[in-house]
Amino acid sequence: MTSSPETAAPPPGSNRLTGMASWTGLQVEHRQIGPGSHRCDRPEMTELAYILSGRSRIRRHADGPLQEGLALPGTSWLTPSGTAEKLLEFDGEVECLILYLPAKLLEDSALRDHDIDPGQAEIAYAGGFADPTLSQIGLALRDLIERPSQPVDRLFADGLRTALAAHLVGNYRADRWQPAERQPTLEPRRLRRVLDYIEARLSEAISLDDLASQACLSPFHFARLFRRATGLAPHQYLTERRIRGAQQLIVGGGTSLAEVALDSGFGSQASFCRAFRKATGVSPTAYRDLHRRRPVLES
């Protein structure tokens, strides 16, 4: 979607939320992208955009058919290095991680060891898909760049990079990837109604029955279709949004952790702290201290 991580021209209304994190063969950028038509440059690196929050319909076009889809939390958008993108439009705002990988994801010798022709390892221009493995890697990288640094960070990032490269080569090669057959999923208007309901009631108790009723479906049918649409189970999505809301309250300052817990929909400060540490790898107090020292970087 950009030319390179260091020289990219920011889209309108876009800003970096943290500095660029860089390891061997992997760079990670945490960015908020606003609506509008974005400048298209030929990227020097393969880019994977993983959506963390927000909603937007995306229209983009390179060689081949026009791609249109919903950018929802848990979905990914893949742009191989050298792609001549002609159109990139957002109609809403999203928070995302952009992962930058080398044009050659794996060495030729490693590909041949697994009976993959290096000449057939080109990555597809693919978007709008929910992949649980990419979700796990994306969330792990988000937590890695947000928590205080540790001596083993480089080792951990190297492992994630190798897993990511292998997964992309194994599942998203241009010679084998095809858009998934259209399966029953939540209609956009029903999904939007459910997501709006969640955002308006993050501080309240929300049950699966509550969400299913917003979609006019049985709880079982709703849970299956919601996961297909977002890549996350309803309770995982709800917890993720509550944690993200809590992070914003913590960074904003002026609110005690007990108030943050209640305003984010947790029954107690203790349950909030457990969920926060599980999701981010650090305690709320450590997260607050970290962000007191880390300013938001405007592009």
Image (spheres, rainbow, N blue to C red):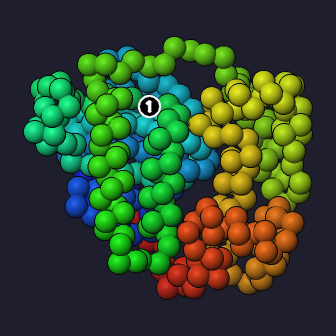
Residue 205, compared with residue 268, is above or below; it is above
The picture places residue 104, in percent across and down from the top left corner, at: 17, 41
233 or 17: nearer the viewer? 233
153 or 253, which lies in front? 153
Residue 135 appearing in the image: yes
Residue occupying image coordinates x 31% and y 68%: 154
Name which residue lies at 68% across and 48% down.
236
Q: Residue at x 31, y 31 (%)?
A: 170
Q: Residue at x 53, y 28 (%)?
A: 69
Q: Does residue 196 appear to the left or right of 95 in the view shown?
A: right
Q: Is residue 164 left or right of residue 32?
A: left
Residue closest to the eye, 39 or 97: 97
- In this figure, which residue is indicated by the disc labeled 1? 127
Q: Quadrant of residue 115?
A: top left
The type of residue carrying mark 1 is Gly
Inspect this view and state whether residue 58 appears: no
The quarter holding residue 48 reads top left
